[in-house]
Image (cartoon, rainbow, N blue to C red):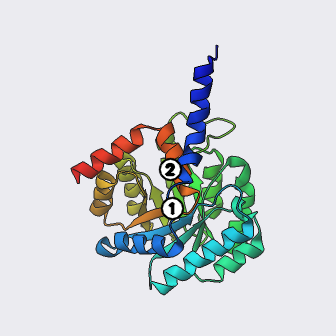
Amino acid sequence: MNFPGKVLLRKARYALPDAVGARLPIETSEVAVSSCLRIATPAGTRISLGYFAPPDEEPAVVAEALIGAARALQAAGASAVELAVKAPPLGFDPMLLERIAAERIPLIFDALTPEQAPETMALAETLGCGVALPARWRRSVDDACALRERACRIRVVKGEWADPRDDPEDIANAHLDVVRTLAGRAAPVEVATHDPGLAEAALSLLSSSGTPAELGQLRGLPQRRSRAVALRHKVPVRYYYPYGPGWGPYAIEQGLRKPYLPLWALRDRIAR
């Protein structure tokens, strides 16, 4: 039975990310790039800069924001950088994506929902962009096979959305299945995980096969133990730095859904 107070609490919980996020200061591209460089310069960390658009933003406006980010990276003289791009907010428009790519900053497509994957993969192939492959999607091993011999960069992630057919019971093993499929390729593979055990297994597979590898780390999550694994394997770290009007509500929503994340990050910061 839904009691009135319980219904109100549920409504308040779902309204909270947008309500609080709307009051947070929004980073401009220049501020985001400056923050990236402060992180990257001391330790040689590589950067993926990702713009999070609000749900109602027009594709052309999203494109201009990404072009602005590319120009800010160029003006700062940043190296070893890329733009992480979400195709759906751009309306899967190849002309907008070509305008962004013309700024000569490498692009990599983020993975969103399984339903959007075929169109995103087709765009990545047409434009020669990198892609993220979610381990929990059954199709990702086939996608890895198709991309294995191509020159695009690949990021292997856990994936936020479940496979609509059958989510794997062990996502860590599914992650390693995708990495095994890619081991031995000439182009780079990024292992995106904050799990030191998974990072160890995946980077060992790539190192033993001679595959160029990176460890991917996300803004706001603990990195001390996973970065130690990258250091042992002598592979670079790539730091995914999301920003923009949609980032605050998204981060708050993740913290509410997974309350262990802020505590985990706090413990990591204290340990450092």
Residue 256 to residue 145: above or below? above
- How far across and how far down the image is residue 138, in percent? 63, 44
Q: Residue lying furthest left in this view? A: 271
> For the point 59% across and 57% down, which residue is it?
246
In the rendered view, tell whether residue 117 sits above or below residue 164. Answer: below
Residue 95 lies, with reference to residue 228, above or below; the image says below
Residue 239 location (% of width, % of height): 42, 64
Q: Nearer the viewer, residue 23 or 38?
A: 23
Say whether residue 82 is left or right of residue 90. left
Q: Which residue is mark 2?
A: 251
Name the residue: 58% across, 34% down.
12
For image coordinates 41% across by 43% down, the residue present is: 261
Residue 184: image location, x then y, percent:
49, 64
C-alpha gap between disc 2 and disc 1: 10 Å
Q: Nearer the viewer, residue 107 or 142?
A: 107
* Count of residue discs: 2
Please give left or right for residue 243 compared with residue 97 in the image: left
Image quarter (top left, top right, bottom left or bottom right) of the C terminus: bottom left
Q: In front here: 25 or 269?
A: 25
Residue 95 on image: x %, y %: 77, 75
Of mark 2 and mark 1, the one earlier in the sequence is 1
- The kind of residue on which mark 2 rests is Ala
Q: Give the residue type that dot 1 points to.
A: Pro
The numbered disc on residue 30 is none
Residue 235 image-quadrant placement: bottom left
Q: Secondary structure at mark 1?
A: strand
Q: Are marks 2 and 1 in contact (CB under 8 Å)?
A: yes
Can you identify the residue that label 1 sits on? 242
10 Å crowding of disc 2: few (<14), some (14-19), many (20+): some
